[in-house]
Amino acid sequence: MRRRFLHHIYFLSGLAPSLIAALAGSLVHAQEAGEPAASDRSRLPLLYIDPPAYLEDGVNPVMPLKALVVDPESDPAFGQRLDSIRLYSNTVADIELDGGAWDFDLVEELASLGRLQQQQGDHGGAIETLDRAIHVNRINSGLYTLEQIPVVEQLISSHMALGNWEEADTYNNYLFHVQQKAYGLNDPRLIPVLDRLATWNIQAFKIGYGDLLGIKLRQSQIMFNAAARMVSLHFGKADKRFINYQRNIATSAYLVAKNPDLMAEIGNPEYRSMQQMLAEKLNGQRQVQPPGFQTGERALIEIAMFYQEQGYDSYGLAEAITYLADWYLMFGQRQGALKNYKLAWDMLQELEDSEELTSQLFGKVTPLPAFGSSIETPDALYTNEDGTEALSFDYADLTFDVTADGLARKVVSISEETQDNQMQLGKLRRSVRSMRFRPVLVDGEPARSFENHFRYRYWY
């Protein structure tokens, strides 16, 4: 429990590592002393802030909750699966009786049994069953057979459901090794393999798994770039996967840029050589590209070029150019931001529904970054092993001005402030002052807006 709690802290906080460590120490101490009462929990430091919802008069925004564990017994098919589990268990016993513990026919039966155990929520039992299926397969077919891939993927799902990050990391890397060995480096069947490991590396960074988190980010960029290159090579840049990979590259680049201390850890020659070897192996690059600002800029330019080359989605192109302008704004490059905001604005004025589309993109301030990503956080972060919530959350409404440079000023909490939530609301206000927002545009130029009303959900 202590180990998992530390992972929660690292992912959920956007703070500097030294402050994270201080928070971790105090919170672990609280955990070791016993679960705090509700009133005590409300005084714990704020750890994470969800993207806020813009509040308009008369509209109550829906802020979706993080996924919680659902009791499988509430599923009408629970009893049917229980009967199937008994049947598969009996079949496994019969095969063992006739052919022994290593009979190859066991693999399929064990894989099916493990899948049913997963659906029942018995991930511990599923791991034991699936691990055995993999072992039997290796005994019969060799260590690196492709037949084991679906079973390994199932095994990873159960490890992630339980928050077994070390095992998830080991098997994700194993999957890549096996399939890269079988397919080679330019086979399109490697694309989803690269996607999976790159996605896991981002997730591992978010949950704080690994000694050198900067390597996780850098490897994710190299692999997403390789996946995008292979999609372009085999299917063309019109393939939607190409755009999705570029968004994920930009996401990792943003995380890199906001965590320079983590990247400094991997700056020594040994780690640089490892990154260069991986980049050259997957992308044919002799040099590792800068992992932060320039990588994100290049990815967002690729997205804009995609829409330009398609030629039929003018709003999509204007939105892509806006994301590029946002990128420049987030990194203090005002001229690049102004130029691209004006370009996107002018494009919208030529469209049939120009007023509506312009309002949609530039009529209200928008929290940055806004380009989005398909990478989700593992649900196990939000729950303990017994299915109870690992963190608490609350809501707060804030109003603030946003300058033409996208900075929040005059931040005021309009939610009720009590002794219990005073610490969290103070930290929330300070956090908002450090964030960047896309300002409203008036006649194509960024302008200051007043008393923007947002609802935040914060976790503690």
Image (cartoon, rainbow, N blue to C red):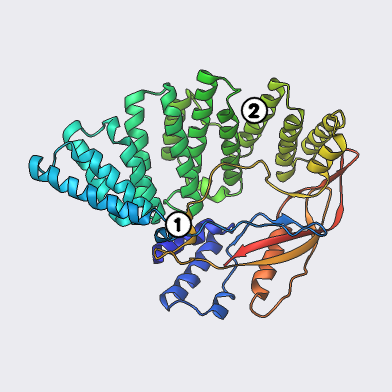
**SS at mark 2?**
helix
Q: CA distance from mark 2 to mark 1?
A: 34 Å
- Which mark is drawn over residue 302? 2
Q: Which of 434/82 is in front?
A: 82
Q: Tell me if mark 2 has few (under 14), some (14-19) or many (20+) residues whose alpha carbon lies within 10 angstroms of its own.
A: some
* Label whose residue precedes the other's in the sequence (2 or 1): 2
Residue under the image location 31 percent in, 56 percent down: 124
The amino acid beneath tag 2 is Glu
- Which mark is drawn over residue 411? none
* Residue picked out by circle 1: 380
**SS at mark 1?**
helix
- Picture coordinates of residue 157, whole percent (x, y): 39, 47
Residue 123 placement: quadrant: bottom left
Residue 368 higher or lower than 76, as above or below: above
The amino acid beneath tag 1 is Ala
Q: Which of 276/46 is in front?
A: 46
- Picture coordinates of residue 48, whole percent (x, y): 59, 60
Residue 76 higher or lower than 335, as above or below: below
- The reply to whether residue 385 is visible in this rendering is yes
Q: Are marks 2 and 1 in contact (CB under 8 Å)?
A: no
- The reply to whether residue 121 is visible in this rendering is no
